[in-house]
Image: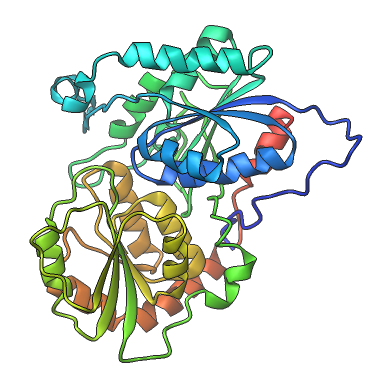
């Protein structure tokens, strides 16, 4: 097993425990859903151990947190859109992004940090950031220990080679700008990282976190093909992060050419004036529905976000990855092919979907082999937080 954290909750501390309950500030990026999914498990773990948590999050992550943790204090913060190129941050392109023209950003972020001060009796004992820089600034200003936990930091801490026109500096430069200093940098990975360390930035690898729905209780549904050989079920997921290169009409037209396959499409797209055939179902981003559909599926067509691919690997679901134009997604998509879990294509086409559907059984078997091969696991993030931070 490649060290995935299947058990995300410890038993609560017994009454009379001498362990110290801590005040924790957590910042969660809201660009894409992977950050929120990962930190959901962390917050539940902290809750089970009796710690007090204040959440600062952006956009979709804040909506998820308020839905799943209505009893927790939470405020919205704004994260700038920082564009990059192969040499690092692209300040000119960042300046032209409409998202960064929002007024009153500092006022809103400072108001959120003031609410943090009002919530805790003293300054928080620990600050954790999943790619959210506002909480890091709070940690620096108040001399509080900072832990970064995300998936991107491995590109700061390890010398990944270039892919096509992309380099690791696209991610590393942003991380250096957002988090120039951290007491502990943790980065999850569903694949083995064999590249040399960057001597300037220590980053420790940990195993990916899984949703509660994807734990030992879901083992019977790992990779089990649909018994109806003539009606495969494929989940299709397009990340809200970035711009997908094809429009909804093009995607639906491709899927329409496979009437004997049921496609369940999750996206935030507008399908107005798009004719959708009966074998294609449309869903918004639904935290409850999606895990169920993924466990029942015979395969997954998706953009190449790390969290979702980690879940697919755990469930042994074959993957057709369509990476967005980022270094991280290109690396993840390439590892899907290298591990034998699926294919990577630049766009969704009749040819790429045909190839994928014809190889589902073979890909599932190869995924099982890959899973069994990587028995040397990375440590659990919870073990690291316990050992290094006393949580």
Q: Is residue 350 visible to the viewer in this orientation of the structure?
A: yes
Q: Is residue 248 above or below residue 226?
A: above
Q: Is residue 296 left or right of residue 18?
A: left
At 72% from the left edge and 42% from the top edge, which residue is drawn? 48
Q: Position of residue 161 (x, y in %)?
A: 31, 42
Q: Is 90 in front, or is 227? A: 227
Q: Quadrant of residue 126?
A: top right
| Image mark count | 0
Q: Is 99 in front, or is 152? A: 99
Q: Is residue 163 above or below residue 366?
A: above
Q: Is residue 12 above or below residue 23?
A: below
Q: Is residue 147 left or right of residue 251?
A: right
Q: Position of residue 63 (x, y in %)?
A: 42, 40
Q: Is 85 in front, or is 160? A: 85
Q: Is residue 288 left or right of residue 265?
A: right
Q: Position of residue 362 (x, y in %)?
A: 38, 81
Point out the image quarter for the N terminus. bottom right
What colouring style does the render use?
rainbow
Q: Is 313 in front, or is 52? A: 52
Q: Quadrant of residue 155?
A: top left
Q: Is residue 158 visible to the viewer in this orientation of the structure?
A: no
At 30% from the left edge and 48% from the top edge, which residue is drawn? 329
At 16% from the left edge and 26% from the top edge, which residue is drawn? 98
């Amino acid at each position: 097993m490649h060290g995935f954290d299947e058990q995300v909750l410890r038993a609560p501390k017994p009454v009379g425990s001498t362990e110290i309950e801590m005040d924790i500030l957590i910042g969660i990026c809201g660009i894409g859903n992977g950050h929120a999914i990962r930190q959901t498990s962390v917050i539940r773990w902290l809750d089970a151990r009796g710690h007090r948590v204040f959440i600062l999050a952006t956009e979709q992550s804040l909506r998820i947190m308020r839905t799943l943790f209505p009893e927790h204090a939470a405020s919205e913060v704004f994260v700038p859109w920082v564009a990059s190129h192969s040499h690092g941050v692209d300040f000119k392109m960042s300046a032209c992004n409409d998202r960064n023209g929002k007024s009153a950003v500092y006022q809103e972020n400072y108001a959120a940090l003031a609410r943090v001060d009002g919530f805790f009796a003293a300054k928080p004992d620990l600050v954790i950031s999943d790619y959210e820089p506002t909480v890091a600034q709070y940690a620096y200003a108040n001399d509080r220990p900072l832990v970064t936990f995300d998936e991107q930091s491995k590109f700061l801490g390890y010398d990944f080679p270039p892919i096509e026109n992309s380099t690791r500096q696209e991610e590393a430069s942003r991380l250096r700008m957002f988090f120039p200093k951290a007491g502990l940098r943790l980065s999850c990975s569903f694949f083995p990282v064999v590249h040399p360390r960057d001597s300037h930035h220590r980053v420790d690898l940990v195993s990916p976190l899984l949703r509660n729905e994807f734990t030992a209780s879901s083992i019977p549904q790992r990779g089990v093909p649909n018994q109806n050989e003539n009606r495969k079920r494929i989940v299709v997921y397009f990340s809200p992060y970035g711009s997908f290169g094809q429009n909804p009409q093009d995607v639906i037209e491709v899927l329409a050419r496979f009437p004997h396959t049921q496609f369940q499409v999750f996206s935030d797209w507008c399908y107005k004036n798009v004719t959708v055939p009966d074998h294609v179902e449309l869903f918004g981003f639904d935290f409850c529905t999606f895990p169920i559909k993924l466990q029942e599926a015979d395969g997954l067509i998706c953009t190449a976000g790390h969290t979702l691919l980690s879940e697919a690997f755990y469930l042994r679901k074959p993957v057709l990855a369509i990476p967005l134009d980022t270094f991280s997604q290109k690396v993840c998509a390439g590892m899907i092919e290298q591990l034998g879990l699926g294919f990577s294509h630049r766009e969704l086409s009749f040819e790429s979907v045909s190839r994928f559907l014809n190889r589902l059984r073979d890909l599932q078997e190869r995924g099982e082999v890959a899973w069994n091969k990587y028995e040397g696991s990375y440590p659990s993030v919870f073990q690291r937080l316990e050992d290094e931070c006393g949580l």
